[in-house]
Amino acid sequence: MSELAFLLKYSLRNLFRNHKRTMLMIFSLSLGCAYILWVLNFANSSSKEIINEFLSQNTGRYVLTNKNFYEDNNKKKFNFYKVIDQNIELDKDISQFITPRVVAPVFISGQSKTIGLLLTGIDVSRELELSTIKDAVTIGNFISPNDENTILLGIRFAKKIQANIGDDVAILGQGLDGSMANELFRVVGLMNFGGGDLEEAMAFTQLKSSQNLLSIPHNKVHQLVNFSMQDTPLPESSDFVSTHWKDLLPEISVSMQFIDNFTWIVCIVIVLVLSLGLSNTLMITFLERESEFNTLNIIGAQMRWVCLSLIIEVLILGTTALIIGTVFGYLLTMFFYYYPINIEWFTGGQPIYLGGMTITPLVRVHSHLDYYWKVPLIIYGFLMLTMIYPLMKVIRRSRNVL
Amino acid sequence: MFFELKDVSKYYESSENSKVFGAKNINLEIKPGDFLALVGPSGSGKTTLLNLIAGLLLPSSGTLLHGKENITSLSLEQRTQHRLDYMGFVFQDYQLLPVLTAAENIEFPLQLKKIDKYEIKKRVNWALEQVGLENLGNRYPKQLSGGQQQRVSIARAIACKPEIILADEPTANLDSKTAQEIIQLFLKLNEELNLTFVFSTHDQRLIDQVKTVLYVKDGKIS
């Protein structure tokens, strides 16, 4: 015990032998740790905020459908025949985030053209509560829950078919029973998705209007969309299945995964570069004391004792730096939680284009608790590896002669 | 006799396949209480001989015995342990650890020997007393003069109660007055503690006061 205390005292004092260098090493290591923590938290929060904003606008986090809804055979039909009961019994925790939808490909005729798109029938009151689709309407008004046969078109689509607010457009589709669906709808609002493809691909009307148009009973829908922020899957049965947005939009999911993984790679590269710098500094520090190690060995200290004292020095240095770095990283993250970052700062003022729409989220940087042990542990691991070469050099160069 | 060098040679291969001898056919017996000076010009082989006695260098041929123990057959770690157990060292440039106080420097080898902390304290005080630095134990090496640092170095060497003290040019960095004090200290320790001293020197003041002088030239004792 006394020997260990002596060893600790010796190592600790050696750290302050060249206190400027030690402080610089602690500073660079803690700054690196704090920066990596912040970058990871920022990247994680950014992708979460982007996804949340994207999903809350239209897609939702989970979609409950008939188990054969996504079958190729169903998709080939002009109307999606596979419907589910609108009033499926769900827990209150889930049902409060659920909104029903009818989706069907239809043709819409304006003054100049007839073009096909996906008509979505929505429960207006529920959508106003749960989704942010209303925010996309920049010209005219959002459809009212009390009206019937009013429609929202994308700006690009309306321009193509030459339809304006107040105009009637004719919709042609196929009913659930195979009959011809044909009805006039009045344009009440135009949606702006930042010029994205969604402006030409989607139109929205009241759920009831779409059910009437497509001869769908009022208790049947195609989808129950979950707008909860939680990733809790919806219950499934022999009749219906729950599909996560990642499976619905795999290309977006992969992009987000790429950003997350790339951030980790960048962080590991930062740690590597930091390690190389530290390794060099450690080597200089160790080799400066070569003659001292020689004396220690001559008077009876085994080389393992010498190495242990050096390892303890690096452990003390690393622990101090990583504690400071972790606290600093946490404070930095907290700062940007209270003062969110506008993502446009990183895009030159341009919004992000994702899945046919543009989004401009304000990123509130959240602390991801996992990072607070993973990052210091990884840096610690690298620090230990960093030490190996300088230690081997010390052992190899020990002369052990007077 | 407790240290014996039997026909010990140490040579290095030169580039032209010829051998350069640091020590050549050395036969030497060191008895308890001996006060031996190895004298000779620079490069004569004094330090090589000290390194061989200490087990820091292994001879190219011959045997080094401590009592009945053949030091040449010991492993590197065993030789280090052997030095800790039986030898004390005094260096030309003191070689004190700058981050430790005088007392802690003396304590260092005692900690390596895992001696009880009360015994350590006793021995540190005793060693400081022996070298006349009772009141300077809390000072760091840089706060001490050259002579005082060499005294601390001697205290560190004797604290472990070694059988032999090996000193390499112990007075080379000191002024004549301080060198004289160090010589007197060596003699006092030799007489009072019956401590064996082997040191290399070319300091005539030291040579004049030594019982046994061994002249070393070209790796040979004459």
Image: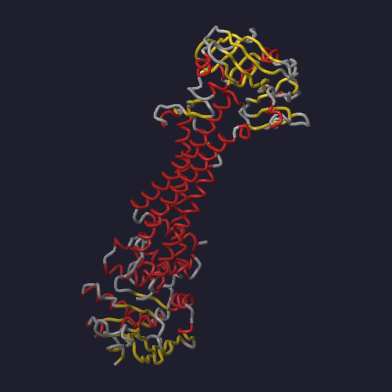
Is A357 or A322 nearer to us in this picture? Answer: A357
Q: Is any atom of residue A105 visible in this view?
A: yes
Relative horizontal placement of residue B88, taking residue A236 as reference (left or right): left
Is A121 or A243 nearer to us in this picture? Answer: A121
- Residue farthest toward the right in the current orientation of the protein: A238
Give the x, y percent position of residue B6. Answer: 41, 91
Q: Is any atom of residue A223 visible in this view?
A: no
**Residue at 55% across, 27% down:** A54
Residue A383 position (above or below residue B20): above
- What is the quadrant of residue A251 in the picture? top right
Give the x, y percent position of residue B221. Answer: 31, 91
- What is the quadrant of residue A144 in the picture? top right
**Residue at 48% across, 46% down:** A265
Relative horizontal placement of residue B173, taking residue A46 as reference (left or right): left
Give the x, y percent position of residue B33. Answer: 38, 85
Is A75 or A44 nearer to us in this picture? Answer: A75
Relative horizontal placement of residue A135, taking residue B186 as reference (left or right): right
Count of all numbered marks drawn on residues in the image: 0
Is A19 or A192 nearer to us in this picture? Answer: A192
Relative horizontal placement of residue A54, taking residue A173 as reference (left or right): left
Residue A48 position (above or below residue A265): above
Give the x, y percent position of residue A156. Answer: 50, 19
Residue B180 position (above or below residue A216): below
Residue A215 position (above or below residue A66): above
Can you say which quadrant of the picture contains the C terminus of chain A?
A: bottom left
